[in-house]
Amino acid sequence: MLSFVARRLLIAIPTLWAIITVCFFLMRLAPGGPFDGEAPVPPEILANLRAAYNLDQPIGLQYLNYMADLLRGDFGPSFKYKDFTVNELIAQGFVVSAQNGLSAIILAIIIGIPFGILAALRQNSVVDYTVSGLSMTGIVVPGFVMAPILILIFAIGLKDTPFQLPAGTWEGGALKHRILPVFCLSLIYIAYLARITRASMIEALRQNYVLTARAKGLPFRQVVMRHALKTAMMPVVTFLGPGIAFLLTGSMVFETIFQLPGIGRYFVQGALNRDYTLVMGVTILSASLIILMNIVVDVVYGLLDPRVRYE
Amino acid sequence: MTSSTNLTSPHGAALAATEDIQGRSLWQDALRRLLANRAALASLVVLVVIALACFILPSFLPWTYEQIDWDRMEANPPSIETGHYLGTDTLGRDLLARVLFGGQVSMTVGILATFVALLIGVSVGAVAGFLGGRVDQLLMRFVDLMYTIPLTFFVIILMVLFGRNFILMFLAIGCIEWLTMARIVRGQTLTLKNKEFIEAARASGGSTLSIIARHIVPNVLGVVIVYVTLTIPQVILIESFLSFLGLGIQEPMTSWGMLISEGAAEMETTPRALLVPALLMTTTLFCFNFLGDGLRDALDPKDR
């Protein structure tokens, strides 16, 4: 298993390198730059600015410099947030995004998986139809529709009642300010988890070994929890792996709607402002996390299903 | 059945029935199953109605999507007299006309991007599956690699850097949505390529390219159609997501995502500016998903 992980990590390096390189040249090839804002900058100042950020060097040299800095763990200075390095911005933002993301994952697992199991055990019952219908709704209704509507209900409609939840302010992340964003963030994951768990649980309950376990006279509860659940979790793990990576690196939509100072919002702002280094930094972080989580998924596979071999 | 009406004896009826038996193709079979599925059929009808409304109705409305009603420069309630059947937005533009036009844009992007994904995915999948060996290895490893990359980031970077234009948008989205299509088509091709009719085509001297085009591709169409129906709503979602963040379609053009974004900004005063586009878009997404599920049930050989 160790050599499997090592090999996968080795393959990840060229993948990451390719992502960084494509990203870097895409940004430099594009017309326009980070310093053409609304007010035109005098050419002398522009030249100085470009020199200060080494943008006047030949592109090959810029690339080599950037890669050298990256190897030392330095993402460079932000072009727009003066006086901040990208490392500082990402470090601040990642804490916020990861906290919210983690809460959302936990919420999704606590709610989604049990309801999926319940629906599978009572297939074609009212419970099943309710769970399936709700999860379909959660999947189809996009977050940027759900969030404003929930804000309309909880922040505006229920104003001056004990159920009012603030939106659009962060205030250092007080618990009350987190409820709505975290709930919105977890909704689609709850929906997917319930749906996937239901489908794979139904499949697992039809397997021969489940029949064997029941024939041996094991209590049904034990058959479900110990035998069926283990295999049923495989598609769930496949979904959760990249899902966790996405959640940890913050949601562009919800961080924009709720104005959370996370890295998803930094990415959107960075992209709009052409803050090259910031956009690169967030992309590299997300890509690494996703690649890492995919490796974790493959390892967990082997733990769940003894038939899977690490080749 | 005209001949059977005047035949009364059981023997005669049986005879007439045998005369009437016609071969049913797989497609006719699938169509019958689809028509029997009420949810899918209703979704299809609703989708056609929404599409017709979006593409035809705007030309019959008194206002266009970008026209500002200078007499009413703020959000107006719906009214028949002014011709703003759903009222106006905060700039005095007709909401109904904007929602319908936004639908046009969203659906067009959805269909065009899916078409791009279809072209790439089917070609890559069919070629990889049919040729096998090293070509297959190479193409599929590339697909695996692409899966591990956060591709929406690339679309955003592309859109921001090269101008937010319509053509780039659907090309870029199409270029990230073909991966699953390629995998599915490859899987189907692998099972098809050892069938007798492929051998027959080879024996009669068909070139590899013509076998792929004439025998493989038509036979994977069923699966492809299902997947296309499920890809269109995904693309509509991506487009709306980009437009919502201000990274997609640009003014004065609009799309459902942008309208929702504008509506969300003024929802305290005029909630309908948010609810109308949201409702229309969600309905469309629902219908595509139901239709896709229905088509899968109708075309998937597993469930027969």
Image (tube, coloured by chain):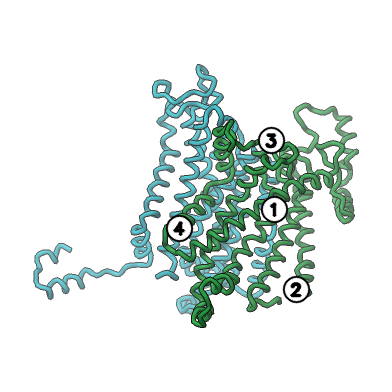
Chain colours: A green, B cyan
Closer to the chain start, of discs 2 and 4, is: 2
Marks 2 and 4 share the same chain = yes
Whether discs 1 and 3 lie on one chain: the answer is yes
Q: Are marks 3 and 4 on the same chain?
A: yes
- The alpha-carbon separation of the residues under discs 1 and 4 comes to 28 Å
Question: Badge 3, how many Cα within 10 Å: few under 14, some, many 20+?
Answer: some
Determine which residue is flagged by label 1. A102
Q: Is residue B189 visible?
A: no
| Pointer 4 local density, CA inside 10 Å: few below 14, some 14–19, many at least 20 | some
- On residue A169, which mark appears? 3
Quarter of the N terminus of chain B within the rendering: bottom left
Q: Where residue A72 sits: x, y (%)?
A: 89, 54
Q: Earlier in the sequence, mark 3 or mark 2?
A: 2
Answer yes or no: do the residues labelled 2 and 4 have beta carbons within 8 Å?
Answer: no
* Residue depicted at x 54% and y 20%: B73
Q: Chain of mark 2?
A: A
Amino acid type assigned to the residue bearing label 3 in the image: Thr
> Mark 2 packing: few (<14 Cα in 10 Å), some, or many (20+)?
some
**Between discs 1 and 2, the one toward the N terminus:** 2
Q: Do the dots labelled 1 and 4 sit on one chain? A: yes
Q: Quadrant of residue B250?
A: top right
Task: Indicate the amino acid at tag 2.
Answer: Phe
Residue carrying label 2: A4
Q: Which residue is mark 4?
A: A127
In terms of depth relative to the viewer, which is nearer, A90 or A180? A180
